[in-house]
Amino acid sequence: MNLKKEFIDYFVKNGHVEIPSAPLIPENDPSVLFNTAGMQPLIPYLMGKAHPLGKRLCDYQKCVRLTDLDSIGDKTHHTFFEMLGNWSLGDYFKKESINYSFEFLTKVLNISIERLAVTVFEGNGDIPRDEVSASIWESLGIKKERIAYLGVEDNFWIAGETGPCGGDTEIFYFRSNEEIPEVFDPKDNRWVEIWNNVFMEFNKDENGKITELPQKNVDTGMGLERVVAVLEDKTDNYETSIWKEIIAKIEEISGKPYKGNEVSMRIIADHIRTAVFISADNAGIKPSNTDQGYILRRLIRRAIRHAKKLGIDTNTDWMEGIALEVIKKYEDYYEEIKNNQKVVLEVLKNEGIKFNRTLEKGLKEFDKLLKNIKGNTIDKDLAFKLYDTYGFPIELTEEMAKEKGLKVDTLGFKEKFKAHQELSRTSSQGKFKGGLASQGIIETKYHTATHLLNAALKVVVGPNVHQKGSNITSERMRFDFSCDHKLTEEEKRQTEELVNKWIIDDIPVTMETMPKEEAVSSGAEAMFIEKYADIVNVYSIGDVSKEICGGPHVKRTGELGKFKIIKEEASSAGVRRIKAILE
Ligand code: SER
């Protein structure tokens, strides 16, 4: 069974519109490194903005969650996963939502009702106990003993600290061959959560204050990997059809069977799959020592270390075969996986070569230490040496230490690392302030300024300038664009002047919704056209600029203040980067 297809077909049949998976690396949202849930790109619409495709949506969304990084190696955790989701944006609420989930599970997937149990929100001082959901479940045939009421910790959902939120009802499946207990105990881990229906009717602000949203929404998320394991009756996710070819490839390359080598094989499989998705994203992430690039580096290097444990010759291009299996599995669903295959393979190969140069020496250094160590803690100087000289991410050193029953002075390492960073002035402080969830006035202004800068560069530098990326914090905007030369002082001055002229002209900013083709043929600019849904929002700033964009934007350019370029530098080959502020 093709679960993604069954899911989308079912919800489309029930009046939902399929939306494309948002990119794994969120655009214009510096508050998170990766998309962690299907609802994340929908936050503005959950808050009340009209979605161009209507009030009932569904999709499958690429997600990366790093909270589980240490658990990778067990049977059920993954750093990357796909989330199936359906949404009501101020349309249906609890009754229909629960009905849809129940029907999909029991009628489409043919899951026996005997194996299902649910939790509902027990309420707190502000929000009443959710008897409504409980009685809907009962009316569908879920017995009282299989309905558990839980508190804020378990049954109130919010992405991070602020934003749209609400009580939820979670659906569990009894994943064991043992006898199914009559009474559902959510702490009994033979019951696994498979689907979460959040009733998003509130907003939580920065002060923790909860207010009602202008509309009552439903946000659901179902973990694809888990449900596939359920359908295929496996207790080890890595034994399902999702991983079959990938694990087989690792067995082939290492010449070892999965049985007996599960932990390393699962880590390699999981980490290479995630590395493929991160490096395939159009944001162009490369392994580095900060942000997403550091996560990518950590994943690849940890996979390499485990490959070495399995006896794989890591001096070869061993990752390629595994990555190709991953690509084969997903290329029909995600365009960037198909289009950026070459980039992905290059990233893996180059990072492999880089780490291999020092890996052997680093491992020797580590062994030497094991012989001489007094006490049971690896001190900060050695941890730093392993990082700085041999390229061992601190987490890798920690893992290796743990295998030998040792600890690492990670705190000391971090202090040393910070001192070193400040010394080389590479600190990227302030990066994670702001963000989409708190899209404030200043971020909105920078959004509009980004469009003006894009338009000004086309006038001053030439029509071949195209946006390659952008990033906004409450302190500044960053704009990457195609250009074959360093901007001259004169070009920078003219660009700045033009943007400021348009600001003084106080031009109105308007928005229209139209089919994507119409937008493109009317000359609207778009960064990655294939990524947008069929119906798009087009923002125009007088005759100056016309772009496909999710917004938000100011009403008139006069609101922006004074625009100033603070830096112009190379970003990558053929791409320049401007940092600018509004004063
Ligand atoms: N946002 C909820 C979750 O991630 C439901 O989609 O579980």
Image (cartoon, rainbow, N blue to C red):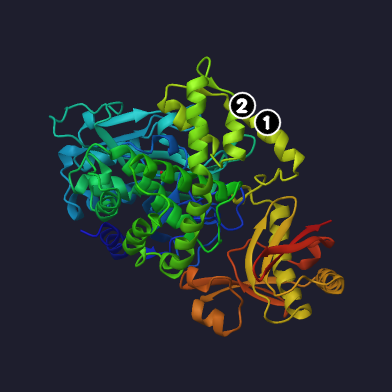
Of the image marks 2 and 1, the number of the one nearer the N terminus: 2
- Picture coordinates of residue 292 (x, y %)? 55, 50
Residue that extends furthest to the top in the rendered view of this protein: 375
Mark 2 residue crowding within 10 angstroms, few (<14) / some (14–19) / many (20+): some
- In the image, 557: left or right of 277? right
- Quadrant of the displayed image that contains ligand 1: top left
- In the image, 76: left or right of 432? left
The amino acid pointed to by label 1 is Lys
Is residue 102 visible from the viewing direction of this image? no
Is residue 507 visible from the viewing direction of this image? yes
Q: State the residue in front, 9 or 333.
A: 333
Q: State the residue in front, 36 or 126.
A: 36
Task: List the residue tagged with mark 1.
Answer: 416
Task: List the residue tagged with mark 2.
Answer: 380
Which of the 4 image quarters holds residue 383? Answer: top right
Quadrant housing the C terminus: bottom right
- Is the CB–ligand 1 distance for label 1 below 8 Å? no
Q: State the residue in front, 168 or 352.
A: 352
- Picture coordinates of residue 7 (x, y %)? 29, 58
- In the rendered image, the vertical position of residue 450 relative to residue 130, given as above or below: below
- Is the CB–ligand 1 distance for label 2 below 8 Å? no
Residue at 63%, 28% (x, y): give it. Answer: 381
Q: Pointer 2 and pointer 1: residues touching (CB < 8 Å)?
A: yes
- In the rendered image, the vertical position of residue 380 relative to residue 328, given as above or below: above
Residue at 56%, 38% (x, y): give it. Answer: 161
- Picture coordinates of residue 450 (x, y %)? 70, 65
The amino acid pointed to by label 2 is Lys
Residue at 53%, 64% (x, y): give it. Answer: 282
Q: How many marks?
A: 2
- In the image, 29: left or right of 38? right
Residue at 33%, 42% (x, y): give it. Answer: 310
Q: Secondary structure at mark 1?
A: helix
